[in-house]
Image: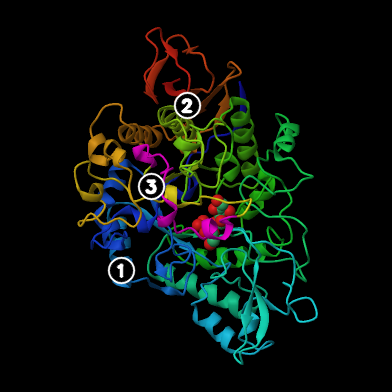
C-alpha cells in the first residue's frame, strides 16, 4: 500500500464539502413561465437537505439579457426578473441556512454583458475616452482598420473581436470578447474595474452568501500588448494545434508525473501571472467576514501543479479539478490523476476538488456511454453517434461512487443524483447556446451545451415532470425522463437517487472528505484505495473499470455498491463498491 495523502482531524467546511450546483433556469419554476426561478429553488431546498449535501452553488441569477444564460451580466447587484427579486434571493439564502446549507453565488468578472451600463457608455463615447478604458477597445489593423487587432479566437468560435460603429456612424474600433460578442472583456489593469468587483463581493457578502464561484478565473489578465498567438483556443481538452497531441502528452507523463488531459500552453489570454494578485486582494476581503466564506476558481488550467497556484494559502480556497472531469474511463488514468491532484494540492495546503458534470459539459453518464468512454464532445446532436444509455448510467454510477469516496470536496451537478443523461436529440430550433450559433456551418460545428441544461424531472406524472405548474419548459424534456423523475426513485432500493443519498450519508459518517488515501494493490483495470479517518476507521473503495468481474477481498463487508454484485462475491465490470476496511 502506498499512502499519497494524510488524514486531517478537523477542518473548515470547504475542505470536505459536497457542493450541489443549481442551474437556476432549469431547477424548478414557481410561476409557470417555463424558466426556473429563485422561489422555485427555495421550495425545493428540502430535496437538497435530504440528499445530504453541504452547500449549494447557483449559476448566475443577475440581471442579464440571457445571451449566454446569465453569464452575461448587465447588473451585478440585481436579480433578473425572470428569476425573481432581491427579496427572493434573501429568502432563498435564509431558507438554505435554516437547513444547514451554505450558499455560493457565481461571480462573472472576466466580462460584462454588452447591456451593462459601462459598455453602453463605452459605445456612446469616443475612442480613447475613459469610458472605453474599462474594456479592451483597440484600433483595427490594415489601412482602414478593417482587420481585427490580433488573431485571437473566441472560445465559442469565430473571432474574439467585434468592430463597433462609432456614434457618428463611421466604422470604428474593435473590442475584445473571449466569449460571445455580447460579452465584452473588461480591462483588469483598470483600477475602477478592480474596485467595482471588490464592491460587488461586499454587496453579496453583506447579504450573507458563503462564497463565490469565480467564472473564467484564469482569464482576467491578458498578456501585455495583446500579442498574436497563432493558435486556436479550446479550454477543455486542450489547445487545438497540429503540432501538439494532448493524448501523447498525457501518455508521456507517466505514473508519477503531473497529469494533463489537454495541452499546457494557455496562450496570451489565459493563466497570466497577474491574475493571482487579484485573488490575493479578494481573499483579504472575504476574510474580513465571519463564517469561513470561500472562493472557488473556475480555471481551465493544466497541469494540476499550475492549477494549484490558484489555491495557495493567500488566494482562493478551491479550484475545480477539470483534469479529473476529462479523464478517460481507464483505471491507470484515474490512479494517475488522483495521485497528481492530491500531491499538487497538498503541496499548497489546499483541498482537492472532484467534479464529473456541470452546465458546460455533456453529462457524465452520457460521456461514459460513448464509444470512446469519457471523451468530451461539445454537445451531442441527433445526427451524432448516440451514447449507450444503460452502459453509461452503469458507468456513471460507478464513477460517482469512485468520486464521492475521495478525500477533499466534491461537486454534484443538478440532476446527476437522478442519473440523468444528456438530452442528445434536441432540435436545432430550440438551442440557445452561443457556441452553437457561432460555430454553425463551420468545420468546428458544435451542438453546444443545451443538452445538459434541460429542466429537471421531479414528478413522473405531472406536466413538465413537475418542473413548472403549467407544463411549460424552456427546453423540451425527453418523454423517457419519467423514469428518472425524483418521485419515481424516492424510496426505491437501488435507484440512483437512493445511491447518492446513501453515499453522502456514509461519506459524512465515515468522514471520507477528511480521510487519508492509500492505494491498495489491485488488478490493472481496478482502482482500489483505502481511506482512514482520524479515529482509525477505514473505508475501502474498489472500482472495476475493466470488462471482467474481480473478487472482493476475503471477509469484506460491503457498505454500498453502484450496481448489483456477482452471486460469487465479485465486483462486476463497471461497478464500484465501498467496503468497511
Ligand atoms: O464550456 C466550455 C466548453 O464546453 C468552456 O470552454 C467554457 O466556456 C469555459 O469553461 C468558461 O465557462 C464559464 O464561462 C463562460 C460561460 O459560458 C460558461 O457557462 C461558464 O461556466 C462565459 O462566461
Label 3 sits on a secondary structure element that is loop
User: Is residue 278 positioned above or below 430 on the image?
Assistant: below
Q: Which residue does the numbered mark 3 point to in the structure image? A: 414
Q: CA distance from mark 2 to mark 3?
A: 34 Å
Q: CA distance from mark 2 to mark 1?
A: 48 Å
| Residue nearer the viewer, 298 or 316 | 298
Q: CA distance from mark 3 to mark 1?
A: 20 Å
**Residue furthest out toward the bottom:** 168
Ligand 1 located in image quadrant: bottom right
Bounds of the magenta span?
416-441
Q: How many residues crowd around disc 1 within 10 Å: few (fewer than 14), some, or many (20 or more)? A: many
User: Is residue 393 positioned above or below 246 on the image?
Assistant: above
Q: Which residue does the numbered mark 2 point to in the structure image? A: 536
Q: Which residue does the numbered mark 1 point to in the structure image? A: 84
Q: Report x, y in % for residue 499.
A: 34, 31
Label 2 sits on a secondary structure element that is loop
Q: Nearer the viewer, mark 2 or mark 1?
A: 1
Q: Is residue 361 magenta?
A: no
**Disc 2 residue lies near ligand 1 with CB under 8 A:** no
Q: Looking at the image, which residue is at 78% across and 66% down?
A: 227
Amino acid at each position: 500500500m502506498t499512502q499519497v495523502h494524510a488524514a486531517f482531524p478537523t477542518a473548515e467546511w470547504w475542505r470536505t464539502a459536497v457542493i450541489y450546483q443549481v442551474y437556476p433556469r432549469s431547477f424548478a419554476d414557481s410561476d409557470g413561465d417555463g424558466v426556473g426561478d429563485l422561489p422555485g429553488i427555495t421550495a425545493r431546498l428540502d430535496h437538497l437537505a435530504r440528499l445530504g449535501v453541504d452547500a449549494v452553488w447557483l449559476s448566475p441569477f443577475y440581471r442579464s439579457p440571457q445571451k449566454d444564460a446569465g453569464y452575461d451580466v448587465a447588473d451585478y447587484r440585481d436579480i433578473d426578473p425572470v428569476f425573481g427579486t432581491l427579496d427572493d434571493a434573501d429568502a432563498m439564502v435564509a431558507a438554505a441556512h435554516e437547513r444547514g446549507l451554505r450558499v455560493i453565488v457565481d461571480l462573472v468578472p472576466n466580462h460584462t454583458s454588452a447591456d451593462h451600463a459601462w459598455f453602453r457608455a463605452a459605445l456612446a463615447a469616443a475612442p480613447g475616452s475613459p469610458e472605453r478604458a474599462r474594456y479592451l477597445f483597440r484600433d483595427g489593423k490594415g489601412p482602414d482598420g478593417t482587420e481585427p487587432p490580433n488573431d485571437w479566437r473566441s472560445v465559442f468560435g469565430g473571432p474574439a473581436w467585434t468592430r463597433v460603429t462609432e456614434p457618428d456612424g463611421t466604422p470604428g474600433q474593435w473590442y475584445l470578447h473571449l466569449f460571445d460578442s455580447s460579452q465584452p472583456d473588461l480591462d483588469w489593469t483598470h483600477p475602477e474595474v478592480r474596485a467595482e468587483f471588490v464592491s460587488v463581493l461586499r454587496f453579496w457578502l453583506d447579504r450573507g452568501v458563503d462564497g463565490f464561484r469565480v467564472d473564467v478565473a484564469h482569464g482576467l489578465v491578458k498578456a501585455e500588448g495583446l500579442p498574436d498567438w497563432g493558435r486556436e483556443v479550446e479550454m477543455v481538452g486542450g489547445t487545438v494545434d497540429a503540432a501538439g497531441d494532448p493524448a501523447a502528452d498525457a501518455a508521456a507523463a507517466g505514473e508519477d508525473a503531473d497529469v494533463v488531459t489537454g495541452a499546457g500552453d494557455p496562450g496570451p489570454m489565459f493563466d497570466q501571472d497577474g491574475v493571482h494578485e487579484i485573488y490575493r486582494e479578494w481573499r483579504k476581503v472575504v476574510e474580513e467576514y465571519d463564517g469561513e466564506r470561500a472562493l472557488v476558481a473556475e480555471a481551465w488550467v493544466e497541469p494540476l501543479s499550475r492549477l494549484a497556484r490558484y489555491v495557495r494559502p493567500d488566494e482562493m480556497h478551491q479550484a475545480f479539478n477539470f483534469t479529473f472531469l476529462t479523464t478517460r474511463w481507464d483505471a491507470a488514468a484515474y490512479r494517475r490523476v488522483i495521485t497528481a491532484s492530491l500531491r499538487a494540492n497538498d503541496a499548497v495546503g489546499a483541498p482537492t476538488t472532484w467534479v464529473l458534470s456541470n452546465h458546460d459539459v455533456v453529462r457524465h453518464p452520457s460521456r461514459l456511454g460513448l464509444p470512446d468512454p469519457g471523451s468530451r464532445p461539445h454537445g451531442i446532436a441527433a445526427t451524432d453517434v448516440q451514447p449507450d444509455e444503460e452502459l453509461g448510467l452503469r458507468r456513471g454510477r460507478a464513477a460517482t461512487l469512485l468520486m464521492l469516496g475521495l478525500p477533499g470536496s466534491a461537486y454534484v451537478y443538478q440532476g446527476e443524483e437522478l442519473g440523468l443523461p444528456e438530452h442528445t436529440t434536441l432540435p436545432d430550433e430550440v438551442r440557445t447556446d452561443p457556441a452553437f450559433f457561432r460555430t454553425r456551418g463551420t468545420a468546428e460545428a458544435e451542438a453546444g451545451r443545451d443538452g445538459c441544461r434541460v429542466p429537471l424531472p421531479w414528478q413522473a406524472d405531472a406536466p413538465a415532470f413537475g418542473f413548472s405548474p403549467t407544463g411549460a419548459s424552456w427546453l423540451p424534456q425527453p418523454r423517457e425522463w419519467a423514469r428518472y423523475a425524483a418521485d419515481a426513485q424516492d424510496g426505491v432500493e437501488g435507484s440512483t437517487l437512493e445511491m447518492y443519498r446513501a453515499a453522502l450519508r456514509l461519506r459524512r459518517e465515515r468522514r471520507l472528505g477528511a480521510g487519508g488515501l492509500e492505494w491498495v494493490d489491485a488488478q490493472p483495470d481496478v482502482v482500489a484505495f483505502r481511506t482512514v479517518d482520524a479515529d482509525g476507521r477505514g473505508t475501502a473503495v474498489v472500482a472495476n473499470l475493466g470488462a471482467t468481474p474481480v473478487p472482493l477481498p476475503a471477509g469484506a463487508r460491503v457498505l454500498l455498491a453502484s450496481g448489483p454484485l456477482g452471486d460469487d462475491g465479485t465486483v462486476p465490470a463497471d461497478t464500484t463498491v465501498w467496503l468497511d476496511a
